[in-house]
Image (cartoon, rainbow, N blue to C red):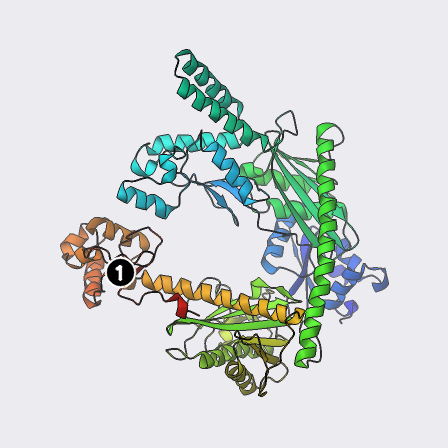
Amino acid sequence: MADPSSYRPRPGEIPDSPGVYRFRDEHRRVIYVGKAKSLRQRLANYFQDLAGLHPRTRSMVTTAASVEWTVVSTEVEALQLEYSWIKEFDPRFNVKYRDDKSYPYLAVTMNEEYPRVQVMRGHKKKGVRYFGPYAHAWAIRDTVDLMLRVFPVRTCSAGVFKNAARTGRPCLLGYIGKCSAPCVERISAEDHRELAEEFCDFMAGRTGTYLRRLERQMAEAAEEMEYERAARLRDDIGALKRAMEKNAVVLADATDADLIAVAEDELEAAVQIFHVRGGRVRGQRGWVTDKVEEITTGALVEHALQQLYGEETGDAVPREVLVPALPDPVEPVQEWLTGRRGSNVSLRVPQRGDKKALMETVERNAQQALVLHKTKRASDLTTRSRALEEISDALGLDSAPLRIECYDISHLQGDDVVASMVVFEDGLARKSEYRRFQIKGFAGQDDVRSMHEVITRRFRRYLAEKERTGEWTDGEEPGAEPGAQADPGTASAGLAEPPASTLTEDDGRPKRFAYPPQLVVVDGGAPQVAAARRALDELGIDDIAVCGLAKRLEEVWLPGDDDPVVLPRTSEGLYLLQRIRDEAHRFAITYQRTKRAKRFRSSPLDDVPGLGETRKQALLKHFGSLKRLRSATIEQICDVPGIGRKTAETIVAALAQAVPGGPAVNTATGEIMDDTEEPGQQTGSPGEPVSTGAPDERRGQER
């Protein structure tokens, strides 16, 4: 525990101007980021008598070992910089709202030639129109199913679309009238895009125009005695009205606004947001956070606004934002929101009328969310604590293993051998700490040797981080071999120790392999456990416990023991170990299947230097298959737009060296493709891997 007076700056050193400050711990990790109108006055509050500080603020200043600041010209710049640094450094003492789930949106991909309606989660993409968020994906599908009667927009995947275009037959929705079937040119691209824009307009709240138009068409059909058409239009009107009823009218003046409510106690806060568009509630979401510092309701609202609109622009930021309390000061936040939208944004507390009544409803939802969270957390905390205690007692550990790492090996008949590392802290998955490895030390199938390699690589990194105080350089995945490009989201650690050039001094980002577990769990029995223990012993690590969980009888194996430890079937500790083992297996086999699919879809063109995806597609489109491309002359290849003579010569040389594969096989159906088609040309449904004489997928022998 550090004494704040040991790193307190002298009063004359701190500028009396707006800025952003960072507290760092003894390892130079950023643990808190804050902004201030006056840095001098704000920082002085942290260096008063510890007894007068909020308990969690006191914990922060005693954990910190230094403080630094950056001066900016305006409070708006301070707000923007604070948000950027919180996203970058993920400080442990900052208020961070986390979604209790990944909320689904109804998305229309207007950035495609034939826009598609679908359910999307995660980060928003440019050129896609979003509606929601919704509480459940089925609510979106019910709404879409009703609206496709009137707006038969494409909903199929790219693979289904291309397969239908190739065969000339639309999917089932095209036959029953819930898709306009642009795949078989029943409708032009321009008309289909106009249909998608009408769909978006209706979802955005402009409903009256379409209902009146359909009612007029129904009346005209009845006058002309086209009763079947009139009945169909009547059903279409009913479907649209039922879709509208799913979003109750709450504001009569067709207001576009977001309402934010906060429920809090001394330790936690729950935030609920209602998204109102066209006077109707179009979406709802909520967060719960720990209050890691003494903070006002206005400050909680400010952090919620940063979380909600930090990456949004344009119409995604509404004209009006209603909150229970205004940030202090409010002007910089309002100016920041206006900049994100590109036009004026009103940030205020509703005082009377419908908006005040709706805010009370949002507040009740926030209160219920906080109560539910506390109930679940209390129950879950008790169960997790009991599970960790049972594991500690069964394995003879000195204390409960608060951080557990589990490793699993996955391969298919000895090919594409990979390993996974999953991390559980306090009995909960810490997915940001997951890592994936490619086995590089040898070829073939040997689970014991693979486990030894993975444990060695992971803890060699731990020792390297322990000996140094720097951080990893930007752009390099932790554990990636120097000069090698790691797969996204993976850490394929090399066997050699990283050079000093791969480390930085004052980055402040969290270290990846710096935190040792109290317990290492391996998927397997005595041989795998012995390999893991041997790897740790070779590195001189003797303070980390090791065990293995065998699948057959769910026995727990310890190093050097001839007999396993058998936990009761009703044991919470055994259940936790099973969940950790199953998560490691899922993570490993997902990575292994991804690598296998990439290998099946490989093409000799992949080895041509400087030949990107666009020009590869142009070549295949021009020649129709790799077989025809292989027999083409340099002059014929030069006829393809974007291909020069030097590139054409490189392509001819690469194809001449490549050994032609066997007949292409659609691994989804087992169908042998036409001899004129070779790997590199997508056959069958796009997205399905095409094998080139490789062994069939033997899922029964996949692990």
In the picture provided, is 297 more to the left or to the right than 526?
Answer: right
Residue 35 point in image, percent of width and height = 69, 52
Q: Amino acid at mark 1?
A: Leu
Q: Quadrant of residue 175?
A: top left
Rendering coords of residue 664 (x, y %): 25, 59
The x and y percentages for residue 410 are 44, 71
Q: Nearer the viewer, residue 73 or 563?
A: 563
Nearest to the observer: residue 228 or residue 177: 228
Q: Position of residue 44 (x, y in %)?
A: 78, 58
Q: Can see residue 549? A: yes
Between 582 and 182, the one lying in front of the other is 582
**Dot 1 crowding, Cα within 10 Å, few <14, some 14–19, many 20+:** many
User: Is residue 96 left or right of 225 when viewed as pictured?
Assistant: right
Residue 37 visible, this orientation: no
Q: In percent of the image, x 83 and y 64: which residue is there?
A: 50
Residue 47 placement, left or right of 29: right
* Badge 1 element: helix
Location of mark 1 (residue): 605
- Residue at figure coordinates x 61%, y 67% from the top left: 424
